[in-house]
Image (cartoon, rainbow, N blue to C red):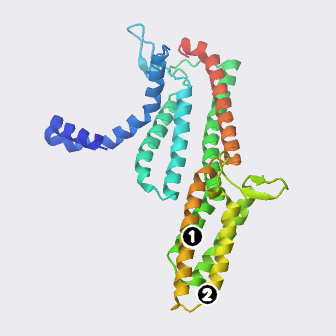
């Protein structure tokens, strides 16, 4: 948190009166540095394991003779796993931003957004430098059949990467809408119950909770006893407890609804009315906490895990295709085509 402030102090000392114009570049610098973290981390691990790699982000124009001109040189970079990681973390950061907003933790959005923008920017620069560029001289060389095939594979791979990003975003939004948003609505209704003492308003909230619980119960894995009776529907795969058992939560909601019906017949100036309202408010608060405990486990449901496996499989397939294209074009790149 003290980093940006320290940068500004250093800029003031270094540039004097012109420090404001230099400080304007600080946000862009922070985003760029965050985006480079993947590439720097890969470099650190390469150094630890003794893997020697050339600096692929530095253009190599192949200037050998004095009369060579860099403007006529075509230069392209290979598509590597580092770029895939940058795209992955960019999409992952986007999902994290939505989760922070919808889980009532917007304070984390600026921190995540800086890194996410950095990942997407560096990934964009990496992709733009992998374009296959022909020699710009007046003598245009005819592409061989193998080069045309490799170029087509590359173009299809770029379309696949774009489709992959769109697919990931769609699945994240669709998964949130079907699995997480109903829990957010239920939590909001419990907040409404806690803040109300009107039986009619509480009854409306409980009916809405029941409507949201019914479709969710159909998606949750079941636990049965010896007589094949369903005793639990829980989003927690391992070490599940009763606090996240949605059958128990549904039964508690039904009990609360019956209590509201009974309380509504009691005069409001009666002490029993206030005692009943306090009991309903306390139970609503406990159930709201149970819903909050269950929410993180809904992100790792069977459907979400299966979609993530498909997403990773597509990433591996696209990388394999691009790596094959790189091998096919290696000889052409060597002679400066």
Instruction: Between residue 259 and residue 192, name the one nearer to us.
Output: 259
The C terminus lies in quadrant: top right
Q: Is residue 174 left or right of residue 135?
A: right
* Residue 29 image-quadrant placement: top left
At x 70%, y 39%, the residue is: 310
The N terminus lies in quadrant: top left
The percent coordinates of residue 241 (x first, y second) are: 64, 53
Q: Is residue 130 visible?
A: no
Q: Is residue 222 left or right of residue 311?
A: right
The percent coordinates of residue 71 (x first, y second) are: 43, 21
Return the residue at label 2.
Answer: 264
* Residue 182 image-quadrant placement: bottom right
At x 38%, y 35%, the residue is: 33
* Residue 151 image-quadrant placement: top right
On residue 68, which mark appears?
A: none
Q: Is residue 265 above or below residue 32?
A: below
Q: CA distance from mark 1 to mark 2?
A: 17 Å
At x 53%, y 81%, the residue is: 275
Circle 1 residues within 10 Å: few <14, some 14–19, many ≥20: many
At x 48%, y 59%, the residue is: 104
Instruction: Between residue 4 and residue 23, name the one nearer to us.
Output: 4
Secondary structure under tag 2 reads loop
């Amino acid at each position: 948190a003290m980093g940006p402030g320290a940068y500004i102090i250093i800029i003031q000392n270094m540039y004097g009166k012109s420090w404001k114009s230099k400080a304007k570049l600080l946000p862009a610098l922070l985003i760029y540095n965050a985006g480079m973290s993947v590439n720097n981390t890969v470099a650190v691990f390469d150094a630890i394991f003794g893997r020697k790699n050339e600096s692929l982000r530095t253009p190599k124009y192949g200037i050998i003779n004095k009369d060579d001109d860099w403007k006529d040189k075509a230069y392209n970079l290979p598509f590597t796993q580092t770029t895939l990681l940058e795209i992955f973390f960019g999409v992952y950061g986007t999902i994290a931003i939505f989760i922070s907003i919808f889980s009532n933790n917007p304070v984390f959005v600026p921190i995540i957004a800086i890194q996410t923008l950095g990942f997407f920017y560096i990934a964009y620069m990496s992709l733009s430098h992998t374009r296959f560029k022909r020699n710009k001289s007046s003598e245009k060389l005819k592409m061989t059949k193998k080069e045309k095939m490799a170029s087509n594979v590359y173009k299809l791979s770029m379309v696949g990467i774009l489709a992959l990003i769109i697919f990931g975003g769609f699945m994240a939004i669709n998964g949130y809408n079907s699995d997480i948003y109903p829990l957010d609505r239920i939590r909001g209704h419990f907040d409404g119950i806690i803040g109300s003492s009107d039986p009619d308003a509480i009854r409306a909230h409980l009916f809405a909770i029941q409507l949201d619980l019914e479709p969710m119960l159909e998606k949750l894995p079941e636990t049965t006893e010896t007589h094949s009776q369903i005793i639990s529907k829980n989003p927690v795969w391992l070490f599940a407890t009763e606090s996240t058992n949605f059958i128990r939560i549904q039964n508690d909601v039904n009990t609360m609804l019956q209590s509201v019906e009974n309380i509504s017949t009691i005069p409001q100036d009666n002490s029993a009315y206030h005692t009943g309202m306090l009991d309903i408010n306390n139970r609503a608060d406990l159930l709201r906490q149970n819903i909050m405990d269950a929410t993180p486990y809904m992100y790792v449901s069977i459907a979400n895990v299966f979609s993530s496996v498909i997403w990773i499989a597509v990433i591996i397939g696209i990388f394999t295709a691009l790596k094959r294209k790189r091998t096919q074009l290696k000889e052409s790149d060597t002679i400066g085509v």
